[in-house]
Image (cartoon, grey):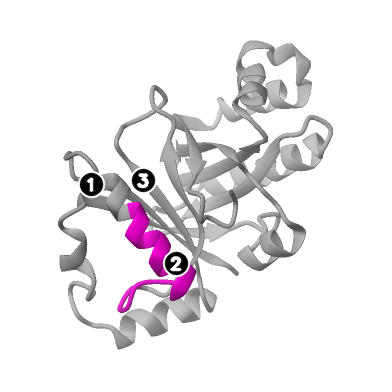
Amino acid sequence: MHIYLHETIDPVRKPGAHTRYLDELGEIVTTHGNAKGSAGGRCIANWVPVFLTGQWPQIIGFWQMPGGWDGFAKHFDTHTELFHEPLDRWYGERSGGFDRVLVGTDYTPTLDEILASGTRAPVVLHETVRLRPGDAPKYLRLLGDVKEALGDRYGFGVLGGYEVAFRNQSEAVVVWSFPDVATLVRTQSSTAEFPELLAWREQSATLELSHTGVVVRPTSWSPLR
């Protein structure tokens, strides 16, 4: 079972703060993999919302946890400090954030599989879905059927589906991959062209309690770029 670390970061509302943060984080990711004292995740992407589609400025970090649940437990049992070491360094560029632990589905590619296949996702629709307690596995199972039905025929599809841990199976994160914004826009303006997608939206609406989507792009140093 593969575990992922998902963080929503709020940069300081000062000119250049978000750029400085991403520049420093990119240097760390490309040279060391991750910051000292952090949870040791391997970077899949750091995304920035396309403005007009969500809160700004904001950064979404997405990491794969080495060792799955065992790796998660080992890290936090051996790092018992309340705040990890790099926190003070980030205070100049970010004002806070919100973290999630995600459990990947069997149809979600790992970072190694993404790298091996050369998968790219220059434009992503990132969805956070709230469900009735216990419904996340069913929702994600149906999403897997949609991923298979779409295949490669349209040039876009489901990159991954994730259950949010510690939520009593009541929340999911879905990542859709698009080659460009024009293709994404067609799924909104010309839904009849994509019957599989239209059927999914009708089906998923019967399970969802709330649904928030934001369009994001990866940084230049993200593996998914």
**Left or right of 51: which side holds 57?**
left
Q: CA distance from mark 2 to mark 3?
A: 15 Å
Q: Secondary structure at mark 2?
A: helix
**Left or right of 90: which side holds 108?**
right
**Marks 1 and 2, the one that precedes in the sequence:** 1
Where on the picture, by quarter, is residue 152?
Answer: top right
Classify 25 as above or below 190. Answer: below
Where on the picture, by quarter, is residue 189?
Answer: top right
Q: Position of residue 206 (x, y in %)?
A: 56, 26
Query: Residue at image x 40%, y 48%?
Result: 60
Query: Residue at image x 29%, y 36%?
Result: 57
Q: Which residue is mark 1?
A: 17
Where on the picture, by quarter, is residue 79?
Answer: bottom left
The disc label shown at residue 59, or none = 3
**Marks 3 and 1, the one that precedes in the sequence:** 1
Q: Which residue is mark 2?
A: 29
Q: Nearer the viewer, mark 2 or mark 3?
A: 2
User: Toward the viewer: 178 or 65?
Assistant: 178
Classify 79 as above or below 202. Answer: below
Mark 1–mark 2 CB contact (< 8 Å)? no
Query: What's the amino acid at mark 3?
Result: Ile
What's drawn in magenta, residue-wise?
A: 22-38
Q: Quadrant of the N terminus?
A: bottom right
Total marks shown come to 3
